[in-house]
Amino acid sequence: MTSSVRGAQLARLLGQWHALPGRHRRPDYAALAAAVRGLLSDGRLPLGVRLPAERELAEALGISRTTVSAAYRALRETAHLTSRRGAGSWTTLPQGHRVATSGLWAAGDDGDVIDLGVAASPAPDELIGAARAAADDLPRYLGSAGYHPTGLVELREAVADDYTARGVATSAEQILITAGTQQALDLVLRLSVPAGAPVLVESPTYPNALAALSARRARISTHGLDAATGWDGELLLGALRQGRPRVAYVIPEFQNPTGHLMDAALRERLVATAHTAGTELIVDESFVDLSLDGAEMPPPVAVFDRHSRVVSIGGMSKAYWGGLRIGWVRASAPLVQRLAAIRVGVDMASPVLEQLVAVRLLAQAPQIVAARRAQLRGRRDALLGALRDHLPEWTVTVPAGGVMLWAELDGPISSALSRAAEDVGVRLAPGPRFGLDGTLERFLRLPFALDEETLTEAVKRIASVRYDLDRGARPTWRAPAVIA
Ligand SMILES: Cc1ncc(COP(=O)(O)O)c(C=O)c1O
């Protein structure tokens, strides 16, 4: 984890920090303080990080030290910063704020905020019935201590059967049940990525995967996905051959955040090249159930694996419910045992009751998944329609599945727009949050997990502040000073 940020680094993160809407035009110090708060709330500046000395930041930004002093004072007043003489200034979480499920910071009193920072849906109707049935089933397990580090056999079997049905023969011994896909990723990284090891990820990618990699102190390099066309096969395979990373992390189904689906031919070549390069592939299948237009799905990446190069991870958060915290790893049986041994040092095992709920839900998979797909299809189309109506300058590639789209904006305004959107009650995750180096300002991830009406309202609000950003360049009306 970074413990301090240099002036030049913070300047790069801040980007166009003074680009704020005309209506909200404020003095430089206030704009700078707002931009730092924006970085805190979208997670690019973590909690407890030491900010550069005032003079250093002033030099990096080419502004006066007085402006930086005033901005730091403003941040102290809102409790986003704590300073101690001689020791420096640290970012802090203001009282009443909380960490949101997306990993982003959120104000505590945000009841009316439309949250487009989270790409996950509410629970299906079937959940309550599944929970009741699971409670009735619980006595079967109450006679034992209840710790099952690899997971309950009946759930491992259900997950394994699903892989087998998708075309990759799998036994229960090859499945480890985890607390969500996120823990699956963390455990695999603990085993496979020593500090400083090179890791290849897509750019853009899922921010909490980047957080897990930073926690392992991985040396991260990226393969850039094209917003319209997705992976460039030659570049991706070239990056593996040349960089020979220890691990490559990919999201081949409805990639977060671009929504692209990797075709079968590239899957096959990816596995072959990873084998030659000595790279382990971590394949995140979080969105695999969510094909929205009925297209035939390519086979799982693991189908092409003949040398145990592929570890697949997945879970129930997207098609079922994130609150269950059920995920899994599919790997060779010996690897599953090694992961289970690590997992005992983390949280021992997954809760028995939740696993029984998961078994009941998976038994109703066809019906639950079909309803989820229909719901998301309607919401995706509503979001696309609202964007066409209210933000026609933006370019969007229609995702064939998943929960989100990746809009290309009409300028490098993603962070400024996200800050302005907060003022009209919309929380956004700006493009740079999905990359490493403060780029991706031309992009914005828009999930379509909320209902149609809310999505349309959110787009209208975003559009209203979008056009304000341009007006910011013009002189704004001020009350005339009284001349006595
Ligand atoms: C690509 C990807 N991986 C992992 C996760 C984490 O999922 P879980 O809730 O199963 O831990 C998400 C959630 O958004 C995701 O998009």
Image: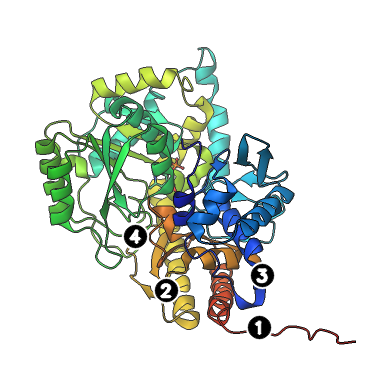
Q: Secondary structure at mark 1?
A: loop
Q: Along the line of sight, which residue is nearer the eye, 64 or 465?
A: 64
Which residue does the numbered mark 2 point to in the structure image? 411
**Amino acid type of the residue tagged 1 in the rendering:** Thr
Q: Which residue, as the protein is rendered here, is positioned at the far top? A: 144
* Residue contact between numbered discs 1 and 3, judged by CB atoms under 8 Å: no
Res. 122 visible in picture: no
On the image, which quarter does residue 152 sit in? top left
Q: Which residue, as the protein is rendered here, is positioned at the far right? A: 484
Point out the tag, 1 or 2, that comes first from the N-terminus: 2
Q: Residues within 10 Å of mark 3 (few under 14, many from 20)?
A: some
Which residue does the numbered mark 4 point to in the structure image? 259
**23 horizontally vs 223: left or right:** right
On the image, which quarter does residue 271 sit in? top left
Res. 418 visible in picture: yes
- Of circles 1 and 2, the one toward us is 1
* Residue contact between numbered discs 4 and 2, judged by CB atoms under 8 Å: no
Percent across and percent down for residue 306 are 11, 34
Point out the tag, 1 or 3, that comes first from the N-terminus: 3
- Of circles 2 and 3, the one toward us is 3
Q: Residue at x 12, y 54 (%)?
A: 265
Which residue does the numbered mark 1 point to in the structure image? 476
Q: Along the line of sight, which residue is nearer the eye, 452 or 166?
A: 452
Q: Residue at x 30, y 24 (%)?
A: 336
On the image, which quarter does residue 154 sit in? top left
Q: Along the line of sight, which residue is nearer the eye, 63 or 156?
A: 63
Distance from label 1 to label 3 (Cα)? 11 Å
